[in-house]
Image (cartoon, rainbow, N blue to C red):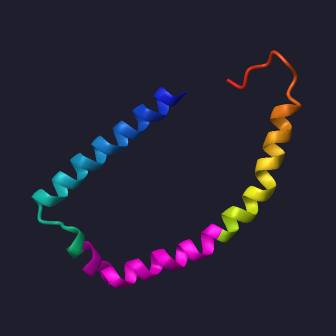
Amino acid sequence: MFQDFLWMVIKVALASLVAGATMTHFGITIDTLMKFAGLTPDRVAELYQQGMAWALPNMMLGAMVIIPMWLLAALLRPPGRSSE
């Protein structure tokens, strides 16, 4: 299972590298894309901070419910059954 995940990460990284190299060849850069979208680096950082300020408390609250439920389900699983 870990090998499948690792292989998927490698494929995504290679596809991203090829796409980035192709776009650079045609003169498309991150600066031109940001200007086209009407964004500045400061605005992107601000949006990132706002997103994290919203997401982290919600993730922690959800984890306080999900992790004990998962642990309980793992402890009560019948013996001899594999999760794979």
Residue 55 placement, left or right of 20: right
Q: Observer-nearest residue: 38 or 48?
A: 48
The residue lying at 17 percent from left, 53 percent from top is: 22
Q: Position of residue 1 (x, y in %)?
A: 54, 27
Q: Which residues are magenta?
A: 33-56
Magenta span: chief secondary structure: helix
Compared with 79, 42 (above or below) is below
Q: Position of residue 5 (x, y in %)?
A: 48, 34
**57 drawn magenta:** no
Does any portion of residue 39 appear in the rendered image?
no
Compared with 50, 78 (above or below) is above
The residue lying at 75 percent from left, 65 percent from top is: 61
The residue lying at 58 percent from left, 76 percent from top is: 53
The residue lying at 85 percent from left, 32 percent from top is: 75
Residue 73 placement, left or right of 36: right
Does any portion of residue 67 appear in the rendered image?
yes
Q: Position of residue 57 (x, y in %)?
A: 67, 70
Q: Quadrant of residue 43?
A: bottom left
Residue 21 placement, left or right of 15: left
Residue 22 placement, left or right of 13: left
Compared with 72, 35 (above or below) is below
Q: Position of residue 33 (x, y in %)?
A: 26, 73
User: Where, quadrant-wise, is the C terminus in this rendering?
Assistant: top right
